Amino acid sequence: MQTKLATIGIGAALAVPLSIISMALAQHSVALSNSGNSAGHFEEGSGFQGDKPFDQEQALADLRKKIEGQETKPAAEVFKNIQILKGMPAGRLLKVMELGYARSLGVNCTHCHTPGEWAKEDKPTKQVARDMMAMVNTINSELLKKIQNLKSTSPTVNCTTCHRGQIRPELNLTDKPRT
């Protein structure tokens, strides 16, 4: 059980992190429930544009082509409306969005963005992602350091720690062990 705490809920060992996580998850659930779809997907974010499905690989290829030659510049200089990860290289930001956010939650770009209008603020999930990133930063930079006897010298959590490829983190333990 100790290993489980270290990998899926390290914050559970402290009352403060648990309350922060619970609050963030509650806000996340509210944002998803306000989307008008009980599954937590936005109609416009369901991956379809008009009559054709959203092609994430093509969208990312188009974005890579658009920023060609600027991949090493800070993201805030290349993209509009970057509020977190401003100093990250623009090319790396695309990989973080694709592999970090989208894959960790089992979604595509349309979960938070309007294709072709990437800077637009029309989806609450975009702000939820920013708030969750702030929560992860607080856990990693402040709270994990206060937990004594962790086996890792640099413990970290990320989106995958809780989400495990699902939009909503699993909040209930099951009798069956994960394989």
Image (tube, rainbow, N blue to C red):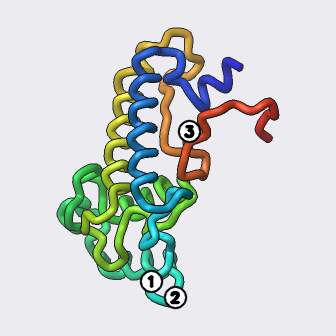
Q: Give left or right: position of 28 versus 168.
A: left
Residue at the spot 67% in from the left edge and 23% down from the top edge: 3
Question: Residue 68 is drawn in which quadrant?
Answer: bottom left
The residue located at (20%, 60%) in the rendering is 76
Q: Amino acid at mark 2?
A: Lys
The vertical placement of 151 against 40, above or below, is: above
Residue indicated by mark 1: 49
**Residue projecting furthest to the top:** 148
- Is residue 176 or residue 179 the one in the foreground? 176
118 lies above or below 133: below
Residue 81's place in the image compared with 149, above or below, is below
Which dot marks residue 79?
none
Query: Which quarter of the rendering shows the N terminus?
Result: top right
Residue 150 appears left or right of 176: left
Residue located beneath label 2 in the image: 52
Front of the two marks 1 and 3 = 1
Give the mark toward the camera: 3 or 2. Answer: 2
User: Marks 2 and 1: CB-CB under 8 Å?
Assistant: yes
- Crowding at label 2, few (<14), some or many (≥20) Cα neighbours within 10 Å? few
Residue with the mark numbered 3: 161
For numbered disc 1, what is the local secondary structure?
strand
